[in-house]
Image (tube, grey):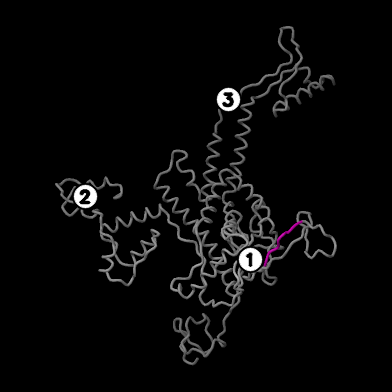
Amino acid sequence: MANTPIKNPPPVQGEGDEWQGAVINTPPEDYSNIRVKASEIGRNGLHIIGGKILEECNEELRWPSSIFTWKEMSKDGTIAPALSYFETWISETPSSFVAPAGYEEKLKKDVDFFNSLKDDMEHSWLAFIKQCISFHRYGFAAHEIVPRRRLKRKGSRFNDGKWGLRKLPLIAQDTVFAWDYDEQYHRDLVGMKQRVGRQTNWNDTNPLPYIFINNVLVNYVEIPRDNFLLFRNNPLKNNPEGTSILAGAWRAWKYKVAYEKVESEGAAQEILGFKVLYIPPEYMTADASDSKKLIFEQYKQMLANASVGKNSGFLLPQVVDAAGHKQFEFDILSQKGTRSYNVSEIIARYQAEILTSLFADFLTLGQAGGGSFALSESKSAMTSMIKRSKQREIEDVINHELIPKIYAWNNMDDSVMVQFKFEEEFDANTVDVATKGLQRTAAVGLVAKTPKNINAIAQLLGLPDRVDENMSQDELNKLLTPNTSGSSEGMAQGLPSGTGNATGGGDTSVKNSENK
């Protein structure tokens, strides 16, 4: 080991060593005499008491109460299509296990093995992806890792004896009631507690522990962190519960629901009208007889029942005064007064806020006569970016938590491992914008026709073939199709012609929208 250069030495200087940039002048024979502070000093600042995460001050948004809030919001007519759009879009994107670039041949067997695991579980891989995407609405999704030997007598389709996956079941979010952290520093998540049902067996034969939750005695199980995958949305402070996408829409949703109730009650009141019941005043005075007071109370109850639709009609005494006016009379007044505010416009405003917070406001483009193609393009690009972010969360968890486990189970060479990836999706709007830009820049000679550029364009368009990046320029020119565009020839013979044969005059090329 003497005089062997050290690559990427630890960032702490040992005794007698002199630093020169990132290289030790006199490298030691080993690292044993270099003092390095290897432990973590800081804390993530997550507020945890008794396994409960107390980051959120609002009870409705704090787990486990928030699960009921998210479920209720998910049924809303504005929110449901936005959630379904993203979750369906993400799950329907094809995915597979692939080798890192440059390792395709070396990892071919590994790739085949991992892709075979997707079809060798008790449920489909698509069902797993659809369930893990629930972290989008609930903030997190935990899936237990259940292995099995790949033997036909064990239910596997294969008989090679390797360790594979039996299933990756979702640990239902509404059954998780506590998180376990290391006892010394409360920094690292070591497991979770899951409620598994109300305790019914009171004797010593019940092996499960129990706990009171909302004054109900329930059994629970403890699941170690190493036994489940944890998908999270925006996990600030490394919060195991993540942050639901619905949290940002909660306030607007509350107001929208309240105004919808006002609108419905107001509409019902206008349809039913305002009820008026006329009775002689002597029945309403404080010194009225007991019998008259009793009759007065009965008429009040009749009027209350009429307001809620319990009475279909009234039977009133035919009593008139000396002038011939009825002493007892029922009437319905129409309510057609105008208000200083428009409830429908207020509701529409909150709907727009909700969709914006869910990155789904493009769903309303054109509904109110607004929106444009350019706006839809920008919205589509943004939603594609959000979708890709969710997919990368799924990829990251599978690549860092699941794949290394399977390599270890089977004692496989893990110096380079396969990766799980969603396929790059062909986005028509993004491609349309990009190709317009390419046409404009290529027309003035700003895009070099090189093999690397051609491959980059092929990847953008989702084309399967690539060119050899070491080929000569002559070989590339022969391979490319002829240039059929005349977009750069207009100036060869002067204005105003776009393709030559000019006779003079002004520049009319501005009429072409692609030049703007």
Q: Residue furthest bottom?
A: 2
* Of pointers 2 and 3, the one earlier in the residue sequence: 3
Which residue is label 3 attached to?
336
Which residue shows up at 64% across the image and 49% down it? 69
* Of pointers 3 and 1, the one earlier in the residue sequence: 1
From the viewer's perspective, is 508 left or right of 13? Answer: left
Q: CA distance from mark 1 to mark 2?
A: 66 Å
Front: mark 2 or 3: 2
Query: What numbered label is drawn on residue 166?
Result: 1
- For residue 44, what is the image quadrant? bottom right
Q: Badge 3 local density, few (<14 within 10 Å), some, or many (20+)?
A: few
Query: What numbered label is drawn on residue 498?
Result: 2
Badge 1 marks a residue whose secondary structure is: strand
Q: Amino acid at mark 2?
A: Gly
Segment colored magenta = 191-197
- For residue 145, what is the image quadrant? bottom right
Which residue shows up at 59% across the image and 63% down it? 237
Q: Badge 2 local density, few (<14 within 10 Å), some, or many (20+)?
A: some
Residue 384: x and y in percent read 47, 55
Residue 326: x and y in percent read 72, 12
Q: Nearer the viewer, residue 17 or 249?
A: 249
Q: Amino acid at mark 3?
A: Lys
Q: Are marks 1 and 2 in contact (CB under 8 Å)?
A: no
Q: CA distance from mark 2 to mark 3?
A: 64 Å
Q: Are marks 2 and 3 in contact (CB under 8 Å)?
A: no
Q: Nearer the viewer, residue 307 or 312?
A: 312
From the viewer's perspective, is 368 left or right of 444? Answer: right
